Each structure stands twice: as C-alpha cells, then as structure tokens.
C-alpha cells in the first residue's frame, strides 16, 4: 500500500516539475526587453532633438534605422514571450489532464476500499479475521495489516484531496497566464503599429536625402578628407612619441651602463679560484630599433593609466553632454543610395555649435592640430589615444595634463549646418577602435 502512495506522490511531483516554465530563459528575455526599452527611449530623445532642426540629415536616417532595428528586436522579444506562454499553457493542460486521470483512478480505488470496508464493517468480522489466525504471530500480522489498511484509506483520501488542490492551483495559474498573454498580445499590436510608423518615417527621410544626394555626397567626402588629415596627424604624433621614448630609453641604458662601469671600477670582482682581481668588463647598452607603432612609455605611471583605461571600457563618459551618433565607426552605405564610405571614429551631432567638448579620461595632451577651419585635440592615456575633432576653440595646449570630464574646447557647426558636431576617434597605439564600445550607454 505504501508503495502505491509513494509512486503517486512521485508522479505528481515529477509532473509539477516538468510543468514549470524555463525560468532562466524567461529572466533573460525580460532583462533584454528592459534594456531594449531603455535604449529605444534614449533614441527617441535623440530623434525628437533631430526633428527640431527641420531638415532631413544622415543623422536622422541613422537614428531611425537604429530605432527600427531595436523595435524589430522588441517585437521579436514579445513574440518569444508569447511562445513561452503558449508552451507553458500546453504543458499545464497536459498536467491537468494527467492529474484528472490519476484523480479518477484514485477515486475508483478509494470507492472499492470503502465498499469493502462497508461489507466488513461489523466488529464480529474483524474479530473473526484475527482469531482465525493459526498462530499468535499470524494474529499479530493480521492486526498490523488492519492498521495499515486503515492508514492506507486515510492516505488515499489525503492524496485525492491533494490532487484536487493541485488541479485547482494549475487552473488558477492558467487563468493568470491567459491574462498575461492578452496583455502581451495588446503590447505586440501596439509595437507593430509603432514599427510601421517608423518605417514610413524612414521612407520619407530617404526620399528627402535622395533629392539632395549630391550635397550629401560632397559633405561626406569633405568629412573623409578631414578624417585622413587627423589620421595622418595622429600617425606623426605616434612616431614622434616613439622616437622620444627611444631616446629616453637609450639615455637610461647609457646611464645604467655608466653606473655599472663606475661600480666595477671602484669594486673590482675577485675570481673564486685564484683570488686574483679581474678587469671590469664594459657593459654595452642593448640596441633596439624604435617601434613606430608603439606609444606606451616604459614607466609605471603610463602602464597604470593604460590598465585603468582598459578597465573602464563601456563606462567612459561621452565627450559632449548631449548628442547622438550620425556616422558610426567602420564602413557604411547610405540607405537606398550609391554613397559609401568608411569612418575611423564616430561623428556626434549636438543641438547647436559652441557646446563644451570634454576629455573622456585622464591623460596628457600630446598635440593640438590645426585643420584649417577647425582644430583637433589629441590626448594620450598610456597606450591609448583619443582625438576630438571639429573644434571651433581650444582651451588646452600640448603637454597639458587633463582629467576625466575636463573641458578641451567648444565644437564647431555640423557639416550640413544642422547643429554642432564632434568627430571622436579612439586608438590603441596605432590601431583604430570603435568608440561606441568604450563609451557608456546613455
């Protein structure tokens, strides 16, 4: 009897365990949805800022494309939630079906035991069952059996009650899941409508840009020319720093060799076998060719600064308080146009020119480069370099030590005349990096 009750208990527990939704997947999905909502909200602020300018721009198109991408991911996230809910409802239905069948079986068994007990309900029948035993031990076994049978009936009743409660609980959970599904469906419909609206806006912006494709192409070519100028200037800075480092290293080696020479002259060594004094051997400095791709100085301060910069990847502040990325890092092609290009950094558009441009980390100004109609500031952070281009004015000079968030100058107007602009680049020694991976998410 005990085996039957235990098997039923294990069955119910196993079914209940299998009916649980994939909690980890659900948690990850909810976290992703929250992150998408925050990023969409941030882009919405940028987009509203762009729309105030009134004129279609590449920045507006890029923000819209990013919004559409996030919106599609958001809709897919809701679709995934709906699939999880449907799977959960399906598993719940199976569980309820099995539990109901099990409940029917339990009731039948319990009914049989009740009928049997009713037919043998008189005390005479119980006494006759005990006293008909062939021995004392047999009589004790029969008494124990009667006790177990009574306990079994009680356990049967408890199991039936527990199964009924479990079925009621699962049905209640189903109602809650169905309500959640209805909310998700309404949200999905709303987000799909918003997605369609954004795609229509994108079509309108592309149409406007195509009508001014020549002007846009000219602006981007001028931007690429300015980027090449900055890259050449950065390359020259890297070579200069590398040479300075090499001169400093050679001087340090020469000073060390001289120190060793003086030490051996005043304290000649003694051979271990004869005890004779040996002639000091002059130590020649090791000759190493300068590495023009390396700017990291051989001192603990710069090594420490490089480590701190690396640790803050994804957490660096933006070079301007408010702005949005109009041109992203790397190769790009303007939507539905023949315009293609490649950006060595990112172009940040601000609401207007004259906005304060700030250093993203502690460092040293290694150059202030004149671009003709604007300026660029180069800052070294150990082996890292950051460049801040399209500045109308500069408040620092070469050799200045700067702190995180310190003002470097003010930005000039954007290439298309809408707002202000900052061209921001980030390099590890001579290798260009995607700045958006280093800046903190807004």
Image (cartoon, rainbow, N blue to C red):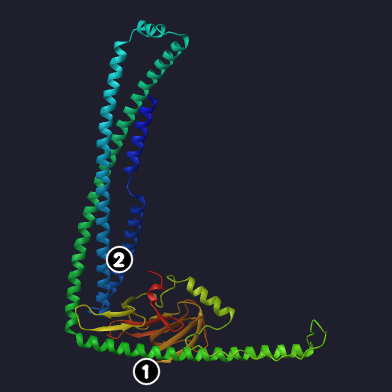
In the picture as drawn, the residue positioned furthest to the right comes out as 275
Q: Which mark is residue 372?
A: 1
Vertical placement of 38 versus 152: above or below?
below
In the picture as drawn, the residue positioned furthest to the bottom comes out as 372
Describe residue 48's horizontal placement relative to residue 290 as left or right: left
Q: Which mark is residue 271?
A: none
Q: Which residue is mark 2?
A: 40
Q: Compute the Cα span from label 1 to label 2.
A: 38 Å
Q: In x, y percent, where is residue 264? A: 75, 88
Res. 48 image quadrant: bottom left
Characterize the local packing of mark 1: few (<14), some (14-19) or many (20 or more) Cα atoms within 10 angstroms. few
Q: Earlier in the sequence, mark 1 or mark 2?
A: 2
Front-lying residue, 275 or 440: 275
Vertical placement of 45 versus 7: above or below?
below
Where disc 2 sits, the SS reads helix
**Viewport quadrant of the C terminus:** bottom left
The residue lying at 32 percent from left, 90 percent from top is 225
In the picture as drawn, the residue positioned furthest to the front comes out as 273
Front-lying residue, 404 or 184: 184
Vertical placement of 26 versus 436: above or below?
above
The residue lying at 34 percent from left, 35 percent from top is 11
Where disc 1 sits, the SS reads loop
Front-lying residue, 149 or 57: 149
Res. 236 image quadrant: bottom left
């Amino acid at each position: 009897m005990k085996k039957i009750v235990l098997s039923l208990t294990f069955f119910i527990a196993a079914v209940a365990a299998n009916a649980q939704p994939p909690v980890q997947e659900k948690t990850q999905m909810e976290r992703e949805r929250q992150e998408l909502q925050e990023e969409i909200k941030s882009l919405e602020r940028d987009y509203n800022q762009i729309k105030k300018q009134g004129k279609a721009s590449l920045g507006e198109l890029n923000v819209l494309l990013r919004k559409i991408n996030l919106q599609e991911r958001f809709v897919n996230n809701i679709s995934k939630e709906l699939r999880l809910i449907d799977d959960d409802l399906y598993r719940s239905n199976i569980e309820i079906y099995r539990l109901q069948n099990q409940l029917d079986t339990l009731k039948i068994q319990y009914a049989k035991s009740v009928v049997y007990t009713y037919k043998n309900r008189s005390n005479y029948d119980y006494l006759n069952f005990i006293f008909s035993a062939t021995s004392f031990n047999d009589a004790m076994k029969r008494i124990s059996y009667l006790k177990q049978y009574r306990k079994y009936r009680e356990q049967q009743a408890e199991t039936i009650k527990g199964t009924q409660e479990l079925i009621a609980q699962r049905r209640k959970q189903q109602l809650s899941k169905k309500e959640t599904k209805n909310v998700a469906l309404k949200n999905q419909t709303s987000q799909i409508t918003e997605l369609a609206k954004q795609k229509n806006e994108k079509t309108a912006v592309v149409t406007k840009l195509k009508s001014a494709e020549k002007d846009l192409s000219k602006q981007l070519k001028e931007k690429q020319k300015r980027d090449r100028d900055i890259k050449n200037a950065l390359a020259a800075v890297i070579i200069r720093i590398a040479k300075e480092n090499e001169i400093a290293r050679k001087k340090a080696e020469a000073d060390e060799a001289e120190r060793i020479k003086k030490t051996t002259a005043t304290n000649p060594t003694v051979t271990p076998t004869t005890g004779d004094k040996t002639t000091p051997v002059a130590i020649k400095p090791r000759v190493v060719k300068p590495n023009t791709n390396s700017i990291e100085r051989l001192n603990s301060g710069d090594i420490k600064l490089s480590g701190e910069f690396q640790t803050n990847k994804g957490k660096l502040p933006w070079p301007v308080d408010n702005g949005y990325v109009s041109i992203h890092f790397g190769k790009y092609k303007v939507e539905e146009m023949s315009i293609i290009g490649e950006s060595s950094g990112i172009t940040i558009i601000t609401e207007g020119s004259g906005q304060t441009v700030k250093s993203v980390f502690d460092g040293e100004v290694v150059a202030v480069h004149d671009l003709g109609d604007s300026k660029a500031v180069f800052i070294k952070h150990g082996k890292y370099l950051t460049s801040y281009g399209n500045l109308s004015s500069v408040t620092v000079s070469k050799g200045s030590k700067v702190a995180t968030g310190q003002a470097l100058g003010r930005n000039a107007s954007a290439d298309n005349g809408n707002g202000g602009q900052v061209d921001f680049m980030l390099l590890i020694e001579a290798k260009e990096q995607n700045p958006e991976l280093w800046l903190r998410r807004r």
